[in-house]
Image: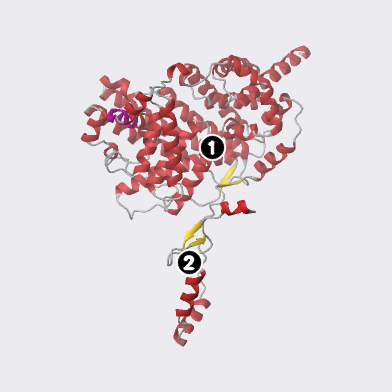
Amino acid sequence: MKNLIKFVEFNECFRCKSKITNRWTICKSCEKRSEATKHKHVESRKSQFIKAELAEQKYPKIPITKFSVIYVNDKQDVNFWSKLKFEKFTSIEHLTSYVLKSNKLPISQLVGEGSWDLGKLPQVQTFINANQNLLIYTQQIGVTKEEIINDDSKFYQYLYSQKFWAKLLYNYIDVLQRYACLFDLQTFDINTVHKPLLIAIYCLGYRYFDDKSDKLTDYFNELASQNIRRIRFKPSLANIQALRIHQVIMNIQDKISDARAILLHMTKMSYMLGLHINTKRFSQRVIYNRNLVYTKILKLLLIMTKTYKVDLSFEFDIPDFNIINYNPEWQLLSPQMAEYLGYTEEERQIIAQIAAFENKYQDKLGLYLIFPNMDKYTNERIERICIDKVERLTIDYNEIMQSYITLTEKYPDYIDFIDFDKGTLESSYLEIAILIFEHGRYKSKAENPVLIAKTFEFCDEFMRVTLLTKLDNIFEFYPYLIAFTYLSMSKHLNKAQMIKFNANLKELAKIFANKLSSNNLLNYLLFNTATYLIDKEQSVTKLFD
């Protein structure tokens, strides 16, 4: 019992400065003195009458957003996961058949964060642990020990080098700001920018720094942890921007649970600051920056919820693009900052142009995942909604493609700096299209042949783009999305499609073998098992033909 005193926090009485427990702000002696000097307040009859009159008046109840839960699960989704916990899987084949053929778990959820949740189930962990030997034959992804410099002198040399910090800022603009900016560059100045935001920028920039060391890595990891603790409960636009950058880092590090928690904090802060409200009461700059933050968070929520069979637990406004000015001038670095980072005048203009049309496109992209409640809709109406969305998505995609072509024609000497990756842009477009059709198939009352045919059409196109992309540049989410979408609908294929389907599976198997790691081992096992079961089924069918 004596040791319990260690867990009690002691404060000082703000009057006599004596030690007291944290239950009180002043000690009992001072409290008695203050009670003795208090005068009893007697309300006048007039004030009593006014209070009684106000109490009788009825005011409309203002709905307050509940931030305890970020989203509300669909009933079918809840039933699936609750039953899954008690399901006794006899083998990896049993698990694969249940997950892929039950049509109860959307493929995007299985490929994304759902596989992380699935892998935490004890019975599934047994299958993963039994196949850990597969990782022995794979190359470790990441920085090798030979590439890491353990020289302390390098550590201090970098920390006190202005060029080092400029390089980190350069990396941030090159990796994130050009494609998913969170603030305008027009007024950006390292001397006046919000300190936690600048720290977050440096932390992300270090992730893409070539000359890493153990000591530098530990330094930036600790810097990021302290920065998050400092700002996560302090709502402000700059703090949300910093948290979003830290969340990007967490996703790179596969810290899924931490990234989810940060998303919850960002959502709370956004609604506390009213970022979700369309308003013209601010300057164009403030509206622009508020919208940049809100649309990025909304897109994260929509990808995490609508396509994963859950509904948002709060009301939100669709951003009004008529009051948002996506003028490239907002992303034009000042001449002083451009010189500090080593950009030429042409590169300064290119960054502004790319940031303008990329962010407008990305901000619109997430809005295509907003669906009405389609539980009572007919299959034909659901089909029409999905096709209309994809047609409008295609128009936006063609516009940004034309913007890149125009930019490369205007600056032919800067094609490498523009770094126009048609494959990456096309992949994001095809991903959203497949997710739209997936949601429509899930909400349909029965199998929808039109949506199934459209899904196969986009999967074939996605497969073509993936095979043309260099292996190192392939985002592993995409091929798994293609593979599991194919596998879940294999029973609808005709003979000609089946031949193409089998050829595509072989190509995907090569990609997965080269990208195998502990993070995607479960998906790799599910894919291998599914292809084995399909081969077995086809062999049996041939015997009876």
> What is the distance, in whole Å, between disc 2 and disc 1 at their CAs?
64 Å
As drawn, the label of residue 117 is none
Point out the stretch of residues depicted in magenta: 161-170
Residue 220 screen position, x and y as percent: 41, 33
Q: How is the image coloured?
A: secondary structure
Most frequent secondary structure within the magenta stretch: helix
Q: Look at the numbered disc 2 and give the secondary structure of its residue.
A: loop
Q: Is residue 360 magenta?
A: no
Residue sitting nearer the eye, 367 or 477? 477
Q: Is residue 17 visible to the viewer in this orientation of the structure?
A: yes
Residue at figure coordinates x 58%, y 40% from the top left: 382
Magenta stretch containing residue 165, yes or no?
A: yes
Q: Position of residue 347 (x, y in %)?
A: 26, 27
| Residue 495 position within the rendered picture, expressed as x and y whole percent measured from the top left | 65, 17
Residue 261 spot, x, y in % from top left: 52, 43
Badge 2 crowding class, 10 Å Cα cut-off, few under 14, some 14 to 19, many 20 or more, is many
| Residue at image mark 1 | 386
Question: What residue is pinned by disc 2?
Answer: 26
Q: Quadrant of residue 226?
A: top left
**Residue at the bottom extreme, as displayed:** 45
Residue type at the position of mark 2: Ile
Going from the N terminus, do you reach mark 2 or mark 1 first? 2
Camera-side residue of 453 and 373: 373
Counting labels gives 2
